[in-house]
Every structure is written in C-alpha cells, then in structure tokens.
C-alpha cells in the first residue's frame, strides 16, 4: 500500500535505490573477481602450468599477449558501466538522506560511508593499475564487499529488525568473516592456491615458514611449475583453519536466529555457510574451476551482508 507520509516515501525510495545498488555492486564484485582470477590462470587450458603465467611474464619483462586483452575487454567494459551506475545511485541516496528535512541521520551516515568507499576504490583502481602486491587486491575485495554489506543495510532502512541480543556473537562472526575474506584474497592474489594440497601437506610445508610470508606488501616470486608459490602455504593453512572456525560460529548462530523468529535470515546463513564449505572442499580436491571460484567470491559477499543484517 502506498503511503502519503513524505518521510516514509523517502525511506521507501531509499530502500529501492539501495537494492538496485546492491545488485549492481554484486555484479561489480563478480566481474572484478572474473578479471582477477582469469588473469591468474583459473580456467586456462594447460592447467596447472598456466597458473600465474601472467605475473611470471610481467616479472620477466614479457609483454602481455593480445588475446588475453581481447578476452577480458567485454568484462572490463561491463565492470566500468556497472561501477559508474552504482556510484550514481550512491550519490542519489546521499542526497535523498541529507537533501531534505528531517535528515535521515543514521541512513545518511551509511550512505556517506558508502560514497567514501566508492570514491576510494575508484582512486585505488586508477593508482594501482600496475601494482602487483596482494595488498591492492585485498583492499579492492574488502572495499567491494563492504559496499555490498552497507547497501543491504540501507535496503532495510526504517524497517523493524530483530531484538539485538546476539550482538557479541554476531560481531565475532563478522570479524572472523572479514578476516577470512582477507585471507582468501591473500591466497588468491599471492597465487597460493596450489601451495599445499591436504591438511597434512599444508602443516608440513608451513612449518618452516615465518609470519613474514603473510606480508601483503611483498610481491610473490613465482616458480615455473606447481606449487607455483610454496611460500603461500601458511596463508593457505590459516584460510582453511579459519573456515572451520567460521562454520563453528555461524552454524549454531543460524539455529539461534531461527528460534528468535527470523527464519529467512537463519536459512540464508545456513545455506550460504554450507555452500561456501562445499565449494571450498571441492576446490581443494582438484583443479580450481573458475566458476567455483566466482561462486565462492559471490557467496562470501552475501554471507557478510547477511551477518550485518543479523547484527
């Protein structure tokens, strides 16, 4: 039913803009992951020899092949259009929150943070086009996921949420999820996916490594053959271990959320957690399909947004 209250109409418009923005941001993060992972070699024909070949070529001063540039041109164009559309929607949301009275203070603060992230990522993309350290990828991934989460939060602006009795539990789950996403992007950007295969292999390989191997400002030195970057075994091991911790946190949380009368949120938490775990296990068992990696990226962003809604 349409409302005649101007304040409620603004909230309704804000929510609609936010959900459109979230859809565009999920497209942006997925396209960004596609560009990054395809460049890394996931889905290439002569796997695993082609894994990391692009970075090895750059490190050896070999020019990027023209067919690689052509293969990603459409994705790059779509990424730019979607990112521009999302930025325009964010500007509209800021104006909607602060351009009329009464000012939507809480929602306006979220929209301003969202705008700051969008502008920051745009500057980072321009400045870091030739930077090859994992820190740049980690900043892009975390920034993009944070934008998705804030957009989802704005999508329920003014709507009643559940009683906030689980804030500490959900807060810990959020922190672990953010750390897990950061470690996942470190594993990806440092070409560490093949650093070890099993738990025993990861433990044995990581035993002789120091914590400096987790430094995201250090450009990875890649070998010509698998495991490509054995120095990444520690990051790989921590990513696996933290994944188990996340299951232990979120699985019982979903049950409690269900008992508190939030069946949709509980189902989303449970299904996303199971899907992430299943994809993670499948990726460890053999080749790294590009489609699985993209789903892993998409579900991670969605899980973070769902936890923020529950918070």
Image (spheres, rainbow, N blue to C red):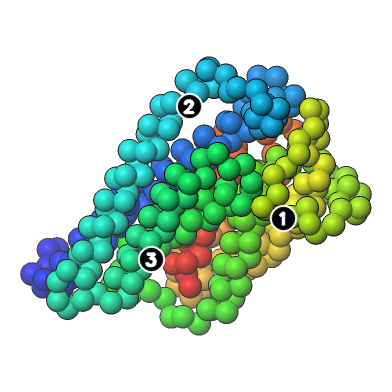
- 71 is higher (above) or lower (below) than 40: above
Q: Which quadrant holds residue 170?
A: bottom right
Q: Which residue is pictured at 60% across the width and 22% down the height?
A: 63
Q: How crowded is mark 1: few (under 14 residues within 10 Å), some or many (20 or more)?
A: some
Q: Which of marks 1 and 3 is in front?
A: 1
Q: Classify residue 281 as left or right of residue 161.
A: right
What residue does disc 1 label? Answer: 215
**What element does badge 2 sit on?**
loop
What residue does disc 2 label? Answer: 72
Residue 10, given in percent of the width and then of the height, sits at 17, 67
Q: Which of marks 2 and 1 is nearer the N terminus?
A: 2
Q: Which residue is pictured at 65% across the width and 19% down the height?
A: 45
Measure the C-alpha gap from mark 2 to mark 3: 31 Å
Furthest-left residue in view? 4
Q: Which quadrant holds residue 219?
A: top right
Q: Which of 255 and 148 is in front in this view?
A: 148
Q: Tell me, for residue 113, which label it has, or none.
A: 3
**Residue 99 appears in the rendering:** yes
């Amino acid at each position: 039913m349409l409302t005649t209250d101007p304040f409620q109409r603004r909230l309704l418009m804000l929510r609609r803009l936010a959900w459109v923005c979230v859809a565009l941001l999920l497209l942006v993060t997925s396209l960004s992951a596609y560009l990054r992972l395809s460049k890394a070699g996931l889905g290439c024909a002569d796997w695993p020899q082609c894994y990391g070949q692009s970075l090895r070529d750059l490190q050896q001063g070999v020019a990027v092949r023209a067919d690689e540039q052509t293969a990603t041109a459409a994705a790059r164009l779509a990424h730019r259009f979607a990112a521009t559309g999302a930025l325009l929607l964010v500007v509209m949301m800021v104006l909607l929150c602060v351009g009329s009275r009464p000012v939507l203070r809480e929602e306006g603060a979220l929209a301003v943070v969202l705008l700051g992230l969008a502008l920051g990522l745009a500057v980072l993309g321009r400045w870091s086009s030739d930077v090859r350290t994992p820190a740049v990828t980690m900043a892009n991934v975390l920034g993009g996921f944070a934008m998705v989460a804030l957009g989802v939060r704005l999508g329920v602006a003014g709507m009643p949420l559940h009683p906030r009795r689980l804030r500490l539990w959900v807060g810990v789950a959020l922190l672990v999820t953010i750390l897990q996403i950061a470690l996942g992007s470190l594993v990806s950007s440092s070409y560490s996916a093949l650093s070890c295969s099993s738990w025993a292999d990861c433990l044995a390989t990581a035993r002789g490594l120091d914590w400096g191997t987790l430094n995201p400002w250090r450009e990875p030195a890649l070998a010509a053959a698998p495991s490509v970057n054995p120095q990444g075994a520690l990051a790989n091991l921590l990513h696996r271990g933290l994944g188990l911790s996340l299951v232990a946190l979120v699985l019982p949380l979903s049950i409690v959320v269900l008992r508190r009368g939030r069946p949709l949120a509980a189902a989303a938490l449970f299904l996303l957690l199971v899907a992430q775990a299943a994809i993670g296990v499948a990726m460890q068992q053999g080749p790294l399909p590009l489609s699985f990696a993209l789903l892993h990226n998409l579900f991670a962003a969605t899980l973070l947004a769902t936890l923020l809604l529950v918070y």
